[in-house]
């Protein structure tokens, strides 16, 4: 075992904790030492109180998913493809009731890319199209958030809840 | 005609700054002039008109015609921090093409305001039933070009040594287009 100073309140042998948010459905993996906790001692879902938490959580689950890693299996990619399809349908259900043609257009492009990226077709570009679909879905979510006066969704803000390695992101303009 | 009943709108940037978006009015001439005064000289070199002349801004405010040029201001309290304009032709072969121009105050760059303004222009373009939005940028304005591309604009051409700055030096002009090809009816998910 490591000889950890007591003030760190840390045990390196401690495994990561898991939680599925009953409200937004976020499937989270996190360091229980760092999580914000409610009065009952349980971790508070990071999406709580944010606009469109279900869409954000669903996006990030796919964004940080295994399908993008080098060791992804065919099953991981197929699962991600299906997740993207469900995610697009969920965005569509919300957009149906809104007068947001630009966001609908983004979703239309996402659906188009999703169709083109069916891994069953064994296209060498399937992963690229899936990535495009997720990217356009993100734009559609940002369109919804913009309409509510909220800043765009930044998945990296939630990366530690998915045991993800940080990737550079910078708003330039 | 675009209905403007969505304004004024409140938006929040990623860092928590709260801004108001609304169309420019006649009473905004001084605010806009102060905004242009704060733009860095190296950025002003690329302006199409000499905004150092206050009468240019005053004349613009006096002759506002939203059907030709719709200026949307971003304000932090009473101060203009961003200006986006949608230029349209009422008749002729470009009546379905809108041109977008955006200026952001130096202290509001890299905070996501430019992206928000592009998003706002896209919404207005859709409501105006335009087929294309066009944006132009000097090749050196890479952050702006990347922001447009991120929002779905495609780089369709580069004109070499096409435009000159206010000191006379030539620059490449990048043309970006946002194609609004999908019909509302075809959008079923």
Image (cartoon, rainbow, N blue to C red):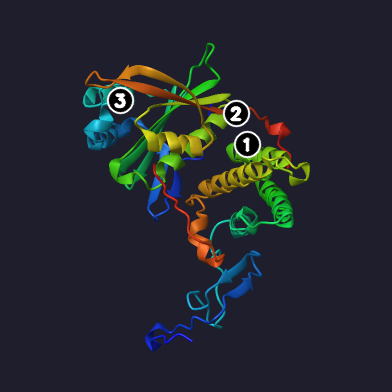
- Would you call the spot at circle 1 few (<14 residues within 10 Å), some (14-19), or many (20 or more)? many
* Residue assigned mark 3: B47
Q: What residue do we see at 63% from left, 42% from top?
A: A128
Q: Position of residue B15 (x, y in %)?
A: 39, 55
Q: Position of residue A112 (x, y in %)?
A: 69, 37
| Chain for disc number 3 | B
Please determine whether, in this image, residue B186 is positioned above or below residue A132. Answer: above
Mark 2–mark 1 contact, CB under 8 Å?
A: yes
Please determine whether, in this image, residue B96 is positioned above or below residue A30. Answer: above
* Residue assigned mark 1: A105
Q: Secondary structure at mark 2?
A: loop
Q: CA distance from mark 2 to mark 1?
A: 8 Å
Mark 1–mark 3 contact, CB under 8 Å?
A: no
Depth order, front residue of A161/A65: A65
Q: Secondary structure at mark 3?
A: loop
Q: What residue do we see at 55% from left, 20% from top?
A: B96
Quadrant housing residue A80:
bottom right
Apparent side of residue B12 relative to residue A80 in the rendered image (left or right): left
Q: Secondary structure at mark 1?
A: helix
Depth order, front residue of A70/B84: A70
Position of the C terminus of chain A, as image quadrant, is top left
- Give the residue furthest to the right: A120
Q: Position of residue B13 (x, y in %)?
A: 42, 51
- Give the residue furthest to the top: B92
**Is residue B170 among the parts visible in the rendering?**
yes
- Would you call the spot at circle 2 few (<14 residues within 10 Å), some (14-19), or many (20 or more)? some
Label whose residue precedes the other's in the sequence (2 or 3): 3
Q: What residue do we see at 38% from left, 48% from top?
A: B111
Depth order, front residue of B78/B44: B44
- Would you call the spot at circle 3 few (<14 residues within 10 Å), some (14-19), or many (20 or more)? few
| Chain for disc number 2 | B
Residue B180: mark: 2
């Amino acid at each position: 075992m490591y000889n950890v100073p007591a003030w760190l309140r840390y045990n390196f042998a401690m495994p990561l904790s898991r939680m599925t948010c009953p409200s937004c459905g976020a499937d989270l993996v996190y360091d229980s030492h760092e999580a914000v906790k409610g009065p009952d001692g349980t971790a508070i879902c990071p999406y709580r109180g944010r606009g469109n938490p279900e869409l954000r959580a669903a996006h990030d689950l796919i964004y940080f998913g295994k399908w993008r890693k080098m060791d992804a299996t065919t099953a991981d990619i197929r699962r991600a493809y299906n997740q993207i399809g469900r995610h697009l349908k969920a965005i569509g259900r919300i957009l149906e009731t809104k007068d947001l043609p630009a966001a609908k257009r983004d979703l239309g492009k996402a659906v188009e890319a999703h169709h083109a990226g069916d891994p069953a077709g064994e296209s060498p570009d399937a992963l690229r199209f899936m990535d495009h679909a997720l990217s356009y879905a993100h734009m559609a979510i940002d369109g919804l958030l913009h309409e509510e006066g909220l800043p765009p969704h930044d998945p990296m803000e939630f990366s530690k809840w998915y045991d993800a390695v940080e990737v550079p992101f910078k708003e330039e303009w | 005609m675009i209905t403007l009943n969505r304004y004024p709108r409140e938006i929040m940037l990623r860092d928590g700054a709260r801004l108001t978006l609304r169309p420019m009015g006649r009473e905004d001439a001084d605010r806009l002039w102060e905004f242009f005064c704060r733009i860095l000289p190296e950025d002003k070199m690329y302006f199409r008109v000499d905004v150092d002349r206050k009468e240019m801004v005053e004349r613009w405010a006096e002759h506002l015609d939203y059907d030709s040029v719709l200026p949307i201001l971003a304000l932090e309290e009473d101060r203009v921090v961003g200006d986006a304009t949608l230029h349209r032709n009422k008749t002729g072969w470009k009546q379905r093409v809108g041109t977008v121009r955006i200026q952001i105050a130096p202290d509001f760059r890299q905070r996501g305001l430019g992206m928000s303004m592009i998003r706002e222009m896209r919404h207005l373009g859709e409501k105006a039933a335009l087929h294309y939005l066009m944006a132009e940028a000097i090749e050196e304005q890479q952050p702006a070009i990347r922001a447009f591309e991120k929002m779905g604009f495609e780089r369709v051409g580069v004109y070499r040594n096409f435009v000159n700055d206010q000191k006379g030096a030539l620059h490449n002009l990048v043309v970006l287009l946002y194609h609004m090809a999908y019909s509302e009816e075809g959008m079923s998910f």
